[in-house]
Each structure stands twice: as structure tokens, then as C-alpha cells.
Image: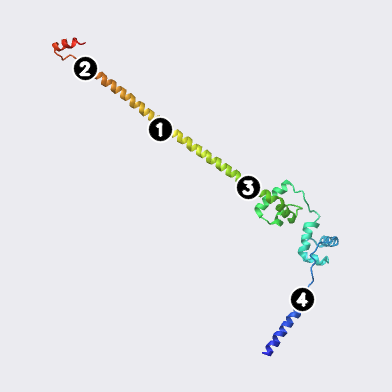
């Protein structure tokens, strides 16, 4: 039991010594603001070796910086062809179309805008274009709702007109039927009256004495 305790204590001491050595050999990277001297050294090194292998660039420039920090400093601040501010209408339109296609992939969008950085494009989107797109979406929804209501009203009006026309046609048909029936009744009544009068004054078969009696009353 005592032997096992001695072995575990030796392992703990060995691990502590190894951690101390690693901490001692590890170099702390500067993460603060860049100085003018660091900018000059980085630019001179990139002019010689080119903008690539950023970890190697940081070592050759003698900078206590990581490769990512050197790349971002060069791309966003030190490039000779960099453009700042005054984004044109053409650039804004291109950003909108590229964002619709690529989403928030700012480095790809900036790659299609010469001289613009992904950081600047991202900031411009968050501060200006995102609000503009949101407002355009709301206006489009309101306009679509307005057009939808107007189409619905037109459709209802068309149905009402069709219904009114159908009712008018039915009324005309009913009037025609009534007129036809009334005319037929008049003709039949006239025919009946005419026949009755002729039959009433027909004395061809009457007795002469009867005729003499009737003549007294006519």
C-alpha cells in the first residue's frame, strides 16, 4: 500500500515538472494595438517575401505576433490598394446581390470588390444595408397585401356583375313568357267572344213566328 502511494506521488511530481517546463518555454504573443514600427517591419517583410505563409512572415519580421494577426493587419490596413469609405451605389448593389447569393461570407464578397476589405463590408452591412433590406421586405409585404386585397375586390366585383347580369336575363325571360301568355289569352278570348256572338245571332233555323216575336225586342 505504501509502495503504491509513493509511485502515485512520483507521477504527480513528474507531471508538475513537465507543466512548468512547457509554461517556461511557451512564448507569450502580443495581442495589443499595432505600433508604427511593427507596421513598417511587416510591410517591408511582405515586400520581400510576398503576402503568404503568414506564420513565417511574423517570424522573419521579428514580430511577436501570430500569423493570423499579421494577415488581418495587412489585408485590412496596410495594403497599398486599399479603399476606405465612400461606397458607391454600384458597390452597394453588388454587395446586396452577393449577400443574397453567398450570405455572410464577407471575405468572398470583399474579393469581388477591388480594394475593399471584408471587415469594412461586414461593418457597412450591419450598420446600413441590413436595415435597408429589412425595410424593403416590409414594404414588399405591404404592397403584396394591398395588391391581394385589390385583386380580391376585383374578383368580387366581377362575380357581382355576373350575378346581376344573370338576374337581368332571368327577368327578361320571365317578362317574355308573361307577354306571350297574355297575348295568347287575348287571342283566345276574342275568338271565344266572336264565336259566341255569331252563334247568338244565328236565326237561320228559327220558326217564323219566333222570329216575329224576337223582332219586337230588337
Secondary structure type for disc 1: helix
**Residue 97 % position (x, y):** 67, 50
Distance, label 2 to label 1, CA atoms, is 45 Å
Distance, label 4 to label 1, CA atoms, is 101 Å
**First along the sequence among labels 4 and 1:** 4
**In the figure, residue 50 lies in which quadrant?**
bottom right
Snapshot colouring: rainbow
Distance, label 2 to label 4, CA atoms, is 145 Å
**Residue 30 % position (x, y):** 80, 66
- How many neighbours does mark 2 have within 10 angstroms: few (below 14), some (14-19), or many (20 or more)? few
**First along the sequence among labels 2 and 4:** 4
Q: Are discs 2 and 4 less than 8 Å apart at CB? A: no
Distance, label 1 to label 3, CA atoms, is 48 Å
Q: Are discs 2 and 1 less than 8 Å apart at CB? A: no
Distance, label 3 to label 4, CA atoms, is 58 Å
Q: Which residue is mark 1?
A: 170
Q: Which residue is mark 3?
A: 138
Q: Nearer the viewer, residue 26 or 134?
A: 134
Q: Which residue is mark 2?
A: 200
**In the figure, residue 6 lies in which quadrant?**
bottom right
**The label number, if any, that marks residue 22 in the structure image:** 4
Amino acid at each position: 500500500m505504501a509502495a503504491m502511494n509513493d509511485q502515485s506521488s512520483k507521477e504527480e511530481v513528474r507531471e508538475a515538472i513537465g507543466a512548468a517546463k512547457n509554461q517556461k518555454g511557451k512564448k507569450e504573443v502580443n495581442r495589443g494595438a499595432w505600433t508604427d514600427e511593427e507596421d513598417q517591419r511587416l510591410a517591408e517583410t511582405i515586400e520581400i517575401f510576398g503576402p503568404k505563409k503568414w506564420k513565417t512572415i511574423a517570424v522573419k519580421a521579428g514580430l511577436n505576433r501570430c500569423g493570423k494577426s499579421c494577415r488581418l493587419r495587412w489585408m485590412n490596413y496596410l495594403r497599398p490598394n486599399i479603399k476606405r469609405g465612400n461606397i458607391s451605389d454600384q458597390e452597394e448593389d453588388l454587395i446586396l446581390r452577393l449577400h443574397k447569393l453567398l450570405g455572410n461570407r464577407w471575405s468572398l464578397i470583399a474579393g469581388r470588390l477591388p480594394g475593399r476589405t471584408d471587415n469594412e463590408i461586414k461593418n457597412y452591412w450591419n450598420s446600413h444595408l441590413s436595415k435597408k433590406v429589412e425595410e424593403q421586405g416590409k414594404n414588399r409585404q405591404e404592397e403584396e397585401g394591398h395588391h391581394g386585397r385589390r385583386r380580391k375586390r376585383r374578383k368580387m366585383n366581377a362575380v357581382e356583375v355576373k350575378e346581376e347580369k344573370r338576374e337581368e336575363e332571368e327577368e327578361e325571360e320571365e317578362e317574355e313568357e308573361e307577354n306571350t301568355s297574355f297575348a295568347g289569352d287575348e287571342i283566345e278570348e276574342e275568338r271565344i267572344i266572336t264565336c259566341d256572338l255569331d252563334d247568338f245571332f244565328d236565326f237561320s233555323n228559327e220558326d217564323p213566328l219566333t222570329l216575329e216575336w224576337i223582332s219586337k225586342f230588337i
